[in-house]
Amino acid sequence: MDVGREAGSAIFLQNEDKGVKVDLTNPDKIFYIEIRNNRAYIFDEYINCPGGLPLGCQGCIIAEVNNKRGFVSAWMMMKRGCRVLISGNYGTDILRKYDPSLCVFQNWKTDTRLSKKILGISIGCTVEELSSIEKYEVPLYFPTIGMSDAEVDSLYDNIVKFDFRRY
């Protein structure tokens, strides 16, 4: 309450010459303040989005996207902040809505430019399919391994239906 009162007063005093009035029940403009670690962040708009960490803050991975489970796995890694390079073509147009600069490779294993950038590989598989996964020299991630097919289908439907136009 104290921060709101002080910030509101400072904003009002800086704009008093413009004839502004304070109306807390029906304001023309709303300001938000977040305080973290002795810093204040002031903004006037919340942007709703699917959530997660900023793309690329956790490095770059390859995601094998050849089916619904691979698609959901790639999306989950994107939410975790990974820049995802797609191997395959299942739903890439939808994933591109989440990352407009999405790169798609038909055969990433032969592309020598990627070997230094890649921190891991995301694979959509079930526990039963795990034994048939080939070995790689980078970490493998299985975001959907503990999910049933129904859970994957449900999450896939939510991802596909997300309406970016509302935001």
Image (spheres, helix red, strand yellow):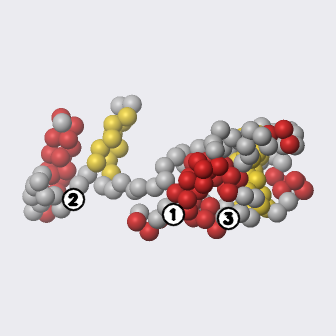
Q: Are marks 1 and 2 in contact (CB under 8 Å)?
A: no
Label 3: element kind: helix
Q: Which residue is mark 1?
A: 161
Label 2: element kind: loop
Task: Looking at the picture, tell me which residue is in the foreground, 22 or 11.
Answer: 22
Q: Which residue is mark 2?
A: 29
Task: Looking at the picture, tell me which residue is in the foreground, 21 or 93.
Answer: 93
| Residue 100 at least partly seen | no
Label 1 and label 2: CA atoms lie apart by 31 Å
Position of 57 compared to 142: left or right?
Answer: left
Position of 5 compared to 76: left or right?
Answer: left
Crowding at label 1, few (<14), some or many (≥20) Cα neighbours within 10 Å?
few
For marks 3 and 2, the one nearer the N-term is 2
For marks 3 and 1, the one nearer the N-term is 3
Q: Amino acid at mark 3?
A: Thr
Label 3 and label 2: CA atoms lie apart by 39 Å
